[in-house]
Image: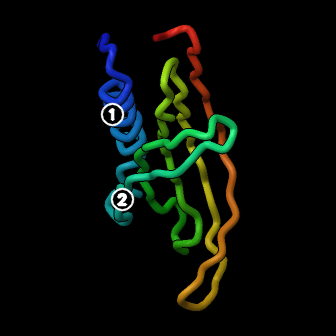
């Protein structure tokens, strides 16, 4: 798919990444796990520009403490492209409401094209 609109392209990529992540969940795990989807937004400090993204969240353990969290984020630049694809895992520590604590990490692929106008 070729499109000059970075928002449409990032939405297409986000959809592809999330569908792939959902399909990667084993059938046994999928029967016992709810998959949540979300929208991400914020500011990338290095670029001082806003970003939009999407994420999926699903459990990967029987005890309900480990989670997979694939996500994609596209920075809204004036020119060029900056998109990140991450597959994070995190552990939720036991705690009480209203706050929760977690720790996690995961691989990230960064696509940056400064030549596109």
Q: Residues within 10 Å of mark 1 (few under 14, many from 20)?
A: some
Q: Is residue 93 left or right of residue 21?
A: right
Q: Residues within 10 Å of mark 2 (few under 14, many from 20)?
A: some
Residue located 54% across and 64% down the image: 61
Q: Is residue 54 left or right of residue 12?
A: right
- Count of numbered labels shown in the rendering: 2
Q: Position of residue 14 (x, y in %)?
A: 38, 35
**What colour scheme governs how the chains and residues are painted in the rendered image of this protein?**
rainbow
**From the viewer's perspective, is residue 27 above or below residue 34?**
above
**From the viewer's perspective, is residue 93 above or below residue 15?**
below
Q: Is residue 12 left or right of residue 96?
A: left
Q: Is residue 95 left or right of residue 22?
A: right
For marks 2 and 1 on the same chain, the one whose residue lies earlier in the sequence: 1
Q: Which residue is mark 2?
A: 35
Residue located 70% across and 64% down the image: 103
| Quadrant occupied by the N terminus | top left
Residue located 62% across and 72% down the image: 92
In the picture, the disc for residue 11 is 1
The mark closer to the camera, 2 or 1, is 1
Callout 2: helix, strand or loop? strand
Q: CA distance from mark 2 to mark 1?
A: 19 Å
Q: Position of residue 79 (x, y in %)?
A: 50, 19
Of 32 and 73, nearer the camera is 73
In the picture, the disc for residue 109 is none
Of 52 and 55, nearer the camera is 52
Callout 1: helix, strand or loop? helix
Look at the numbered discs 2 and 1 and tell me whether their residues touch, using CB distance below 8 Å.
no
Q: Position of residue 94 (x, y in %)?
A: 64, 83
């Amino acid at each position: 798919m070729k499109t000059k609109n970075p928002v449409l392209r990032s939405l297409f990529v986000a959809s592809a990444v999330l569908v792939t992540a959902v399909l990667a969940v084993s059938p046994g795990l999928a029967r016992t796990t709810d998959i949540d989807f979300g929208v991400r937004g914020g500011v990338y400090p290095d670029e001082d520009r806003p970003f939009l993204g999407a994420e999926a969240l699903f459990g990967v353990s029987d005890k309900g403490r480990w989670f997979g969290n694939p996500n994609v984020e596209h920075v809204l630049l004036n020119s060029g492209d900056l998109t990140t694809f991450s597959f994070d895992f995190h552990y939720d520590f036991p705690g009480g409401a209203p706050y929760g604590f977690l720790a996690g990490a995961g691989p990230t692929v960064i696509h940056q094209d400064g030549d596109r106008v």
